[in-house]
Image (cartoon, rainbow, N blue to C red):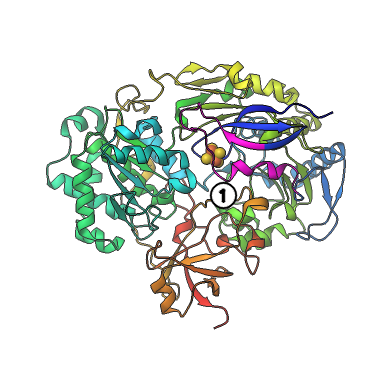
Amino acid sequence: MPTVPTTVPTTCPMDCPDTCALEVRVEDGVVRSIGGAADHPTTGGFLCSKVSRFHRRLDHPDRLLHPMRRVGAKGEGRFERVSWDDAIAEITRRFLRVRQQWGGEAILPYHYGGSNGLLSEELVDDLYFARLGASRLAKTICAAPSGAVARGMYGKMPGVAHEDFPAARAIVIWGANPKASQIHLVPFLKRAREAGAFVAVVDPQRHFSAAEIDLHLPVRPGTDLPVALALIHRWHDDGRLDTAFLDAHADGLEPLLARAAEWTLDAAAAEAGVDAADLARLADVYADASPALIRTGWGLERNANGGQAMAAILAMPALLGKFGRRGGGYTMSNSGAASLDRRALLGDLGWTTRAVNMTELGAWLRPDGPPHRDAVPPIQALFVYNANPVATVPDQNAILAGLARDDLYTVVFEQVMTDTARWADLLLPATTFLEQREIQVSYGTYVVGGIRPAVARRGEARPNVEVFAALGRAMGFRDEPFRWSEDTAFHRVAAHLTYAGEPVDAERLAAGLWVRPDFPGETPVQLATVHPATADGKVHLTPPCLGGEPFRYRPVHGDRRFPLALVTPGSHRMISSTMGEYNSDPLTVTLHPDDAAARGIPGGAAVRVWNDQGEVECPARLSASVRAGVAMMPKGAWRRSSGNGSTSTALTPSHVNAVAGGACFNDARVEVERLDG
Ligand code: SF4
């Protein structure tokens, strides 16, 4: 008998700053629609087109429904169904064998925020791999340099909320595209501009029309540092620094000013390929405006100078005394407003094994050995979950060569058959957020959201907590979390979670609703209701993570054969590689019309984008939205979307940033030629 349609409240767990409140309309066990809650302070009744279609994943032909063992060649994609008991027993047997022969560090867990949430990652999974003595994973693919810098400078002080943008008189969006990856900020930006705010965007690509913003600075990728230093130099020369604030609240000024003195506006403009008059305009408008705020994205950290640039930019509100007023200061990741006491939950992990930088995965896996002389033992077993490294990690060809190794045992725990899942020896089916419990802390807005099942689990899919608990029991580990059910884990996590220092309302979270903090007030005012959480409460303008030569600029000199800088930003269609099975477009490379004309490439022509690391075949798009000298490909594309099975990560280097070992995607340099030419 048909059931009455119901609307289930829940929360989006995707790796997106907005953390929308969702309304899932369900009829006869089928999701009919996913909408945004109208009464939520930032969701405002609308969603992105990515998640509003997420129910297509539930019953998609690529959905993984049962544990499966490889029967074909590696990468061929042929599997046979096995039981969960057999799968758990096989992993246990194989991991024990690897540990006995090579030591626990030969086992590598590989994971990221494919489906974020406090239950799905760094909970029972961490306990399991810690007890195994597996290698630890350094999560560097995104936000490592910016996170280290923000922690070192401000102790991850919460930033300006979406709702307070309209109070600002000047807003600088630096290295971010809210239209693709933070769409719920866009209405607040619009409101700010209607209220008279000056809005500037610093990004190699134009995302906003001239009618939407006041200034676009299309800097060359990787040149944000000289631009920021030149602005600081000008403010210093003009006597604009807020010395009273700096004396009272900051240290580390001298190294920053010494480097800034090396950059005039003219020199920085020449290096960044922008107009010096535009830099002067930005310097003066930002300095004069109050409140003024800077929203940094993660695009500007993805190069060898990224950590240093982030520090120089985050210093600006302190240098000019922009704090203390609603709508003034900076915003980046605001996840520091919440705190989960993992030690109380899990006990002492005692996990001190070597750390493997995830950005260097290809080098660690490839058949000709790991990248570091002391990297013994080699990786012999890989357990991938919440991640799709074939599509998202630099040096795709090295990763594929590694996954093809006969002596590597690979487990992939996934929702759908991704480019990485295809290479598994054993596949485990994971639940989606529509079938499970979760708690999601927003890193952009000020909410913690509860996630509850909207429909029954498909096939034999299981949530992470249950699978890692079963693996731990099979291994004979006796820690209490290995006996948790999903419900137990949910309530334990909620009980150990605080938001702005206060306990969260577990009942609201269990009902799929959101909770807000009290700073006091639902949104913070920097240096008024929230303060630097550094050990001494000061702003450290030159944090130790910048190393021995803070703020030193190292230009990326490309090989002359590869004159185009490749940028690989997030797209409107996917979140990194998530949703590639139902929401991806054919891969394209976007070129400035002048660069295309110089190469005889008309719009739509099939091209080869290449460097010494790899090549990608796809059609060219021509658009003046990317600056000359830059080629743009979306990140996260699946291999089937390109002409030759390679995507942008085949071209991106795996060297890492000196600050926190972050990925340097935007240091890729390429050439493009017409395929039929
Ligand atoms: S991906 Fe972001 S914008 Fe889209 S529904 Fe989720 S939180 Fe909202």
Confirm whether residue 401 shows in the render: yes
Residue on which the image places disc 1 = 576
Q: Is 44 a magenta residue?
A: yes
State which quarter of the image contains the N terminus.
top right
- Which secondary structure dominates the residues rendered in magenta? loop
Between 179 and 361, the residue placed more toward the observer is: 179
Question: In screen coordinates, is 615 left or right of 319?
Answer: right
Q: Is residue 409 above or below residue 156?
A: below
State which quarter of the image contains the C terminus.
bottom right
Magenta segment boundaries in residue numbering: 33-60
Spot occupied by residue 583 in the image (x, y as percentages of width and height): 63, 52
Spot occupied by residue 162 in the image (x, y as percentages of width and height): 40, 34
Spot occupied by residue 504 in the image (x, y as percentages of width and height): 53, 18
Between 28 and 256, the residue placed more toward the observer is: 28
The residue sitting at 49% across, 52% down in the picture is 663
Confirm whether residue 263 shows in the render: no
The residue sitting at 65% across, 23% down in the picture is 490
Question: In screen coordinates, is 255 left or right of 568?
Answer: left
Q: Is 247 a magenta residue?
A: no
Question: In screen coordinates, is 287 left or right of 219?
Answer: left
* SS at circle 1: loop
Q: Is mark 1 within 8 Å of ligand 1?
A: no
Q: Is residue 576 above or below residue 644?
A: above
The residue sitting at 72% across, 51% down in the picture is 380
Quarter of the figure with residue 326: top left
Tell me which amino acid carries mark 1.
Ser
